[in-house]
Amino acid sequence: MTERYDCIVVGVGGMGSATAFHLAERGADVLGLERYDIPHEMGSSHGVTRIIRKAQYEDPAYVPLVRRAYDLWAELEERTGRELLHVTGGIDAGPPESEVFAGSVRSCEEHDIDHEVLSADEVNDRFPGYDLPAGHRAVYQPDGGFLVPEQSIIAHVEAAQEAGAEVRARESVVDFAPLPDGGVRVTSEKATYEADRLVVAAGAWARELVPELSELAVPERQVLAWLRPRTPEQFDASNFPVFVHAADDGHYYGFPRHDVPGFKFGKFNHFGETVDPDTMNREPRREDEEMLRAYAERYFPDGAGPTMRLATCMFTNTPDDHFVLDTLPDHPQITVGAGFSGHGFKFASVVGEVLADLALDGETDHDVGLFGLDRFGRT
């Protein structure tokens, strides 16, 4: 007989692992299906470190969600005994009129977030690894920092399993279909399952499974670099805040040294390469390294030593760079979390809570009006 669950979660990365945990914690009979390992390096939820910050220059509407995310990460740390969130302070910098700086100020003021506004010289004096140009300004947030994504996924999966969830890796979902009774049938490469509810949190593969997302959740190739600092102590977590920086040629982000003998950074949207996640070139190229190194040499010259590591990952972008968190209009038993557009991982803990709410109750107390499919005319 076909196995029947209360809810199936497709994709057990950052968002799916958190969703499986929240569903199981509420007593749901949950199956999580992941096409790769848990965790893995084929999608978006890897890379050693991921930024978390309370100020959200993208839109102040994200702030209540990230505040809840901080609380949930702390609860998960206490529950599992794993250190997941490292506080380093955070810098949002750029020209005064830039989206990064001006948006961060607006977000801090609207939501009363503890912060300082610093000149470039003040940043460079306080944090000598930085060399921001005169005229740039920065918002410093003392509680900014980074999450360790692989450990965060492991923590959510172990907590979900302890709450009764069944999680299966290396089992790719090939199709699903609504059932006449209001449930869903899910077909993987290995078996067929049924459930009352389905959550699709499949990252770059979501568009292949959900036709409504085919033009709304577009994968993009991303490359990260770790360079050995010439003055390593200036790039330790105690001396080097995480950053988002509006430079002349785009937005960059970076981290102190952690678990790799180099400081990590990348450029949002890198070269803007739309890709197929199954055929993407996962080997970094010379031009990837050259572009990233040029940025470090200009703004973090003491950090621009020998290359220690290069890695690829993916963003999955929506047309407006905001998330999709919604149920499908014609099939409310199917919930989707997609299109996190390169700034989603910090929210994984609360996105799991939101997706569990939508799957079980059809609604959530969190304000997710910004993330509905109807904004794209999918009604």
Image: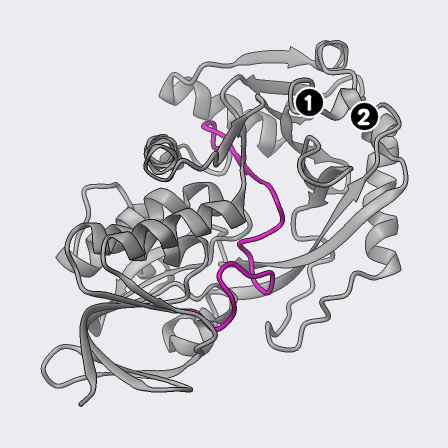
* Mark 1 surroundings: few (<14), some (14-19) or many (≥20) residues within 10 A: many
The image shows residue 36, relative to residue 308, as above or below, that is below
Q: Give residue 190's position: percent from left, percent from top.
A: 39, 86
Tell me: 150 left or right of 256.
Answer: left
The image shows residue 328, relative to residue 295, as above or below, that is below
Point out the stretch of residues depicted in magenta: 34-56
Secondary structure mainly formed by the magenta segment: loop
Q: Would residue 97 be visible to someone looking at this image?
A: no
- Element under disc 2: helix
- Residue 237: image quadrant is top right
The residue depicted at 87 percent of the width and 41 percent of the height is: 294
Q: Would you name the residue on which mark 2 appears?
A: 232
Q: Would you name the residue on which mark 1 appears?
A: 240
Tell me the CA gap for discs 2 and 1. Answer: 10 Å
* Mark 2 surroundings: few (<14), some (14-19) or many (≥20) residues within 10 A: some
Tell me: 329 left or right of 237.
Answer: left
Q: Quadrant of the C terminus?
A: bottom left
Front residue of 23 and 183: 23
Q: Quadrant of the N terminus?
A: bottom left
Label tally: 2
Q: Would residue 122 be visible to someone looking at this image?
A: yes
The residue depicted at 67 percent of the width and 39 percent of the height is: 259
Tell me: 358 left or right of 346.
Answer: left
Based on the picture, tell me whether residue 51 belongs to the magenta stretch: yes
- Residue 78: image quadrant is top left
